[in-house]
Image (spheres, helix red, strand yellow):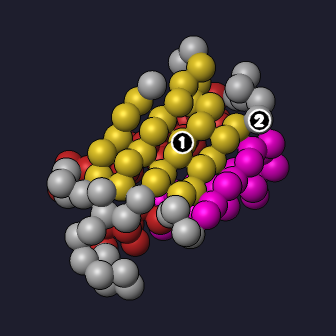
Amino acid sequence: MILVDVLKDGGSIKEIKVKGHSGYDEIGKDIVCSSVSTAVILTANLLERLNIDFECISDEKIPLISLRIKNVDSNDLVNTILENLVDNLSKVQEEYNKYLKINIK
C-alpha cells in the first residue's frame, strides 16, 4: 500500500511524503504507482519551474518521495499547487482505496 502523509502548518501544506508500493500489480505494470508517481513528479517540476524554495527527497530502496516547502509561510499559489496534488491523489484513492491511503496531519 502507498501511504501519503500531508503535513500542515496552520492552513498551509508544508510537506507531502509518499511511501511504499501499491501492490496493485507488478512493478512496471502498476497503474496506481504510476499515477501517484506522475502526480508527485509533475508537482515537483512545477514548483521548480516557479523557483519555489522546496526540497525533494527520493529513495527508491524504501521507496519514498517527499516534497517539503522550506518557507512554510509560502504564498497562496504554492499551497494551491500542493492542494491540487492532494486532490489528485484523493481521486486515485477513491478508485483504488485498497492500494492508497492519505493521512492529513
Give the residue at x 66% y 41%.
Answer: 68
Question: Closer to the camera, 77 or 60?
Answer: 60
Q: Is residue 40 left or right of residue 103?
A: right
Label 1: which residue? 16
User: Does residue 46 appear anywhere in the picture?
Assistant: no
The answer to whether residue 61 is above or below residue 74 is: below
Q: Can you tell which quarter of the image residue 52 is in?
A: top right
Of the two numbered discs 1 and 2 on the same chain, state the one appearing first in sequence: 1
Alpha-carbon neighbours of circle 1 within 10 Å: few (<14), some, or many (≥20)?
many
Give the residues in magenta: 38-59
Which residue is farthest top?
A: 10
Q: Position of residue 43 (x, y in %)?
A: 58, 55
The answer to whether residue 61 is above or below residue 57 is: below
Question: Closer to the camera, 78 or 68?
Answer: 68
**Element carrying mark 2:** loop
Tag 2: amino acid: Lys
The answer to whether residue 86 is above or below residue 99 is: above
Which residue is farthest bottom?
A: 28
Inter-mark Cα distance, 1 to 2: 12 Å
Label 2: which residue? 70
User: Can residue 44 be found in the magenta stretch?
Assistant: yes
**Element carrying mark 1:** strand
Q: Position of residue 63 (x, y in %)?
A: 50, 63
